[in-house]
Amino acid sequence: MDRILLEATDRSPKVDFDFAGGRFALEGEAYPEDAAAFFGPLLQGLKQHVQAQPAAAIRFDVALSYFNSSSAKALMNLFMVLEEAAAAGAAVAIGWHYQEGDDSLQEAGEDFSADFTHARFEMIETPA
Amino acid sequence: MLAQQYTAFHQAIRENGIILSFSGFVSEKVMFSLGEVLRARMQQEETDTGIAKRVFSIFVEQAQNVIRYSANRIAKEPTPPLSAGMIIVGIEEGRFFVVCGNEVLRRDVPVLQGRLDLLAGMNAEELKAHYRVKLKEPPEEGSLGGSIGLIEIVRRASAPVEFDFQDVGADLSFFCLKAYI
């Protein structure tokens, strides 16, 4: 699949979905004007990738400094695909990056991590 | 006369600790710009980063609820949809608050009221669990994901949220929601 590379905007994160390399990243702020339109193609791409290459290892890094509730829902949808892929045998690791002292984002990461049993979910603190 | 008339308005806003107030048609772009001003203002005032993030987060969810659910909404291509409502951010006794108001259909009031009563009765752990369940569920009928927004507002608020409805004519009701941070 073709790599999805999107520059960050004022209200949407930088996206790098490198399917061939098995590396995926979201970075920045996420409260897009239309969350379904923004995240829909990303979710479709990830689903197709997992279907086409069920055994391929996946590294998924999330470094969001803010996301709204619509984006939280979209993240959960992406994470459910990752957990299913891991349950089916793929080596999946998620890196949740948050700034030191950012309790909201740390808590959000901990909440998401509770939904993973097969994929590895790493909390990665970056210095403030 | 003119200045006198609007001084009273201006004064009333100041006296109520209001730092940002908007009433009229709200679009996503208006929301974004107001949010930018709000963030800049909090940065200038050196507001604690954690508090500033929570204020901003509640502001966004509140404003997006107005945009999505105001009963007074005009969607006419090619202009972006416009939703009538009110967004106010202020400080009361050292605490930030965000109030939003918009008209809703009177027949939708019981569902909204029920949803808010349910959330208001939950403790932090219950809210967290409820939030996770809702994140995984497909959206409720007629909802654009806003039920999660309400949970987010209640979770991030530092005190129980206040809400109220006031009937406006036969079909509409003015809905107000206030959250303290």
Image (cartoon, rainbow, N blue to C red):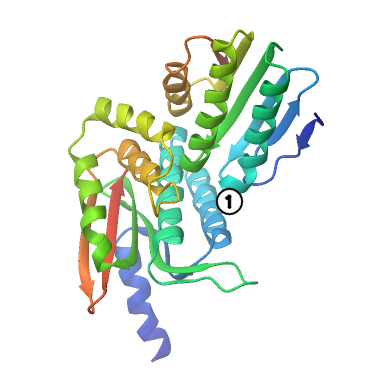
Residue B47 visible here: no
Q: Position of residue B166 (x, y in %)?
A: 20, 68
**Which residue lies at the image location 39% right of the left edge and 41% below the top edge?**
B148
Side (left or right) of B100 relative to A36: left
Quarter occupied by the N terminus of chain B: bottom left
Q: Residue at x 50, y 29 (%)?
A: A76
Left or right: where does residue B87 sit relative to residue A59?
left
Give coordinates of residue B59: x percent, y percent: 42, 50
Is residue B80 at all visible to an observer of this figure?
yes
The residue lying at 54 percent from left, 62 percent from top is B30
Q: Can you name the residue that lies furthest to the front here?
A: A52
Residue type, mark 1 in image: Asp
Percent across and percent down for residue A79 are 54, 24
Q: Looking at the figure, which quarter contains the C terminus of chain B? A: top left
Q: Secondary structure at mark 1?
A: loop
Q: Is residue B53 left or right of residue A12?
A: left
Identify the residue under disc 1. Answer: A34
Subunit of label 1? A
x, y percentage for residue A115? 44, 18
Q: Which of B31 and B103 lies nearest the eye of the viewer?
A: B103
Q: Residues within 10 Å of mark 1 (few under 14, many from 20)?
A: few
Q: Quadrant of residue A97?
A: top right
> Where is residue B23, by image quadrant?
bottom left
